[in-house]
Image (cartoon, grey):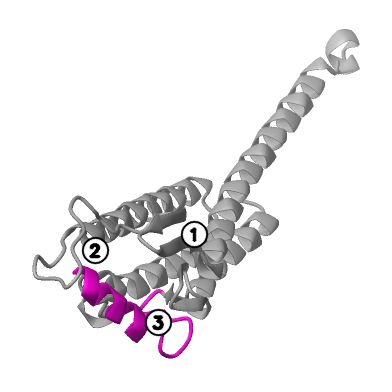
Amino acid sequence: MTTQSKILMAIAALMLVGVYLFPIWSISLEAPQYPEGIGLNIWVDTIEGKQPQDLQNINGLNHYIGMKPITPDSIPELQIMPPLFLVLILGGLAVAAWGSRKWIMVWLSLFVTLAIVGLVDFWLWEYDYGHNLDPNAPIKVPGMSYQPPLIGTKQLLNMRTTSMPHLGFIFALISMGLAGFTWWRSGKANREKQAELKKETKKTKGQVNPNTLYGS
């Protein structure tokens, strides 16, 4: 890897610091009783209301339809994600220092796998959250479930729910894309170097030493 490729890989790893600085995901709700809207921000290690009372208000609404309360301390993924991202950051910096193109792909493959597993796990959490309802809830609608969308907008009774990636997720995507670009760029540089070496080799072989023809 060239020095530029090493720098790009280091930047890709450091971009993941953004997941500690900004929420990863956002869920917004619009309802007649909350015309200004309420919502949740999902961070790497916690879930918070967009406004101070939003989480409490959402749990209050959920109680009436039988949904479990959202308690960040009971969600194990919020304990697992911070060290996982730290491992990715340190691993990416190690790959940049080592300068191995092969290990960029190893790091990128691990990152993509963890991202897919995380999204699937998030969908499963939403499914459980919206389907496993308290049978003794004050409000029961036969056949109704309340699973929020993974991405996009969905109408749930009188609530319009929107789920979208937040800035932390965007930082992670940029990190992933930059690492992929670095892997491609370093491969292109290697191919150009090999082509130049072959060209020089052919040029050297094509030169004729006059001493071999006429003697010294």
Which quarter of the image is occupied by the C terminus? top right
Query: Looking at the rendering, which quadrant does residue 154 occupy?
Result: bottom left
| Residue at point 61%, 54% (across, down) | 178
Secondary-structure class at tag 3: strand
Q: Left or right: 179 with respect to 136?
A: right
Instruction: Report the magenta residues as a range.
Output: 44-66
Mark closer to the chain start, 2 or 1: 1
How many neighbours does mark 1 have within 10 angstroms: few (below 14), some (14-19), or many (20 or more)?
Answer: many
Mark closer to the chain start, 1 or 3: 3
Secondary-structure class at tag 2: helix
Front: mark 2 or 1: 2
Residue that badge 3 annotates? 48
Residue that badge 2 annotates? 129
| Residue at point 33%, 86% (across, down) | 56
Above or below 186: residue 35: below
Residue that badge 1 annotates? 95
Q: Is residue 62 magenta?
A: yes
